[in-house]
Amino acid sequence: MLHKGFIKIADLVKYPKKYSGKTIQLNRICTKINAGIMNRNWIHLKDGSKDDFDLVITSDTFIPEGSSLTIKTLVTLDKNFGASYKYDLRLENGVIIK
């Protein structure tokens, strides 16, 4: 199910259950990328609404740091990969729209 419109990071962090299991769209800046970890690129995003929160999206696409992007992604809660990779809120399978 696609949630219509763009989501602010602050709204996503404040109401994560509202978006759980839904595909959302974000229009943000890539502040960091960890490429090729567990066969995924781990994209860190900020939008100015909650910059103290480290929002992470996994994607097959590499995005250079500092890039502005629009991404469609699935909201997942309580994801534990083991080896210290545990996330209360994480976005998966990000697809770059622009």
Image: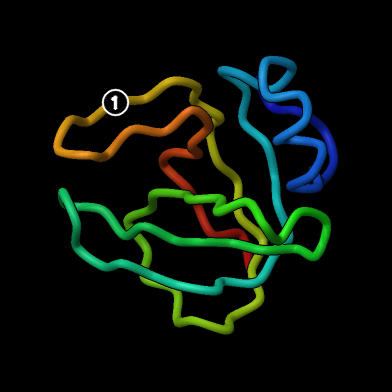
Q: Is residue 25 left or right of residue 7?
A: left
Q: Is residue 10 left or right of residue 28?
A: right
Image vertical order of residue 33 relative to residue 10, above or below: below
Judging from the image, the colouring scheme is: rainbow
Q: Position of residue 44 (x, y in %)?
A: 50, 61
The residue that appears at 67% across and 61% down in the rendered structure is 70
Quadrant where the C terminus sits is bottom right
Name the one closer to the observer, 8 or 51.
Answer: 51
The residue that appears at 55% across and 41% down in the rendered structure is 73
Image vertical order of residue 40 relative to residue 48, above or below: above
Q: Position of residue 82 (x, y in %)?
A: 17, 30
Answer with the quarter of the image where residue 85 lies: top left
**Disc 1 marks which amino acid?**
Asn
The residue that appears at 76% across and 54% down in the rendered structure is 50
Q: Position of residue 67 (x, y in %)?
A: 58, 81
Tell me how many marks there are: 1
The residue that appears at 56% across and 18% down in the rendered structure is 21
Q: Secondary structure at mark 1?
A: strand
Quadrant where the N terminus sits is top right
Answer with the quarter of the image where residue 86 lies: top left
Image vertical order of residue 66 relative to residue 4, above or below: below
Q: Is residue 82 left or right of residue 92?
A: left
Name the one closer to the observer, 14 or 59.
Answer: 14
How would you rate the neighbour count of disc 1 (Cα within 10 Å): few for under 14, some for 14-19, many for 20 or more?
few
Name the one closer to the observer, 11 or 64.
Answer: 11
User: Label 1 belongs to which residue?
Assistant: 80
